[in-house]
Amino acid sequence: MKFSKINLDTIKDEGLRSVTGLERRAFLKIGFAVTGVFAGGKLLSLVSNVNEAFASSSDFLEQYPYRPHYSMVIRQGLCIDCEQCVTACKETNDVPDYGYRTRILRKRVTDAIGRQREFIPILCNHCNEAPCTRGCPTKATYKDPTTGIVMMDRKKCIGCKMCILACPYEARYFNEEVHAIDKCNFCWDTRLSKGKKLTACANACPTGTRMFGDVSDPENVIYKMVHQIEKQVWVLRPEAGTKPNVFYMKATRSSPWELRRQAEER
Ligand code: SF4
Ligand code: SF4
């Protein structure tokens, strides 16, 4: 398989898909240091209201195909870049130093009082129309028919990296220790299957940026957040047609959702 070399002049056009894991790691260091690469790049620039994102399936919001239909809401604006989520994820899921299942993107924003930085957690979107699963020649990656979580079967992975190329979100890396692709699985094996209600990242986040639950359950906080009529909810790269299950919305520290979460935790 041929990969192109990193060319900073063409990054905005090519995104990160065309570089190897090693090159990508080098690039990510550059990307975090070079302000505006991510802000202007494909990953963050193409967002839209969730209703528009699912325009090809207008009744999607009422027809979640999985039970439970695990989803995450990222409350943009609350993240303080403490990376407790990243650390908890790595410790819980045995992610090597060079790897990641979730990351925090840094973006420069301009507001009324001048320039500020905004932090945006990203992870696998557990897409309903997941191009990574279609690209895998051995079915090592697949969508769990019950929960909708996009899983990895390491024993079937041959390391061809087709799924890395197919994913529009840079959600996968090659784990050199196990010689297989690794990615977020919403902590299925390490937490959810053992009765825990939250992923490690959602559990560790001190600001309530990451909310986790069942978007198909009207009683669940995720359902209620995503279906707020007055709130804009968006997904990353809606034009990819992947139907992500990670939703983004603006929030402030004093939002009722945070107060409710804190009350529930007491
Ligand atoms: S974000 Fe990438 S790895 Fe995750 S389901 Fe979608 S295409 Fe697959
Ligand atoms: S733990 Fe929460 S506040 Fe800290 S970096 Fe992660 S998402 Fe942001």
Image: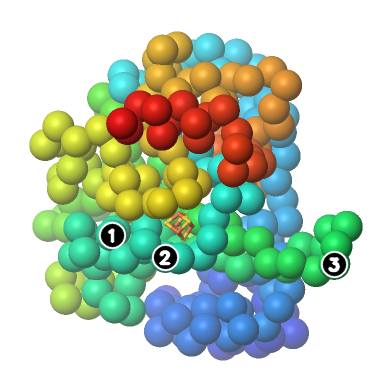
Residue 257, relative to residue 76: is it above or below?
A: above
- Residue lying at 18% horizontally and 43% vertically, measured from the top left: 191
Look at discs 1 and 3 and give the one toward the viewer: 3
Contact between labelled residues 1 and 2, with CB atoms less than 8 Å apart: no
Residue topped by disc 3? 114
Tell me how far mark 2 sits from mark 1, CA to CA: 9 Å
Kindly identify which residue carries mark 2.
83
> What element does badge 3 sit on?
strand
- Location of residue 90 in the rendering, given as x and y in whole percent from the top left corner: 26, 65
Q: Are marks 2 and 3 in contact (CB under 8 Å)?
A: no
Mark sitting earlier along the chain (2/1)? 2
Could you tell me which secondary element the residue under label 2 belongs to? loop
Report the amino acid beneath label 2.
Glu
Question: Quadrant of the rendered structure where residue 41 is?
Answer: bottom right
- Residue type, mark 3 in image: Gly
Identify the mark at residue 153; answer none if there is no mark.
none
x%, y% of residue 3?
A: 50, 80
How many numbered marks, from 0 up? 3
Q: Is residue 181 visible?
A: no
Relative placement, left or right, of 144 versus 17 is left
* Residue 65 relative to residue 140: left or right: right
Residue at (60% x, 79% y) in the render: 31
Q: Earlier in the sequence, mark 1 or mark 3?
A: 1
Badge 3: residue crowd in 10 Å (few <14, some 14–19, many ≥20): few
Other residues around mark 1 within 10 Å, as few (<14) / some (14–19) / many (≥20): some
Picture quadrant where residue 68 is located: top left
Left/right placement of residue 208 relative to residue 46 reads: left
Relative vertical location of residue 62 with respect to residue 89 in this rendering, above or below: above
Ranked by sequence position, the earlier of labels 2 and 3 is 2
- Disc 1 target residue: 88
Q: Is mark 2 within 8 Å of ligand 2?
A: yes
| Residue appearing at x 25%, y 33% in the figure | 197
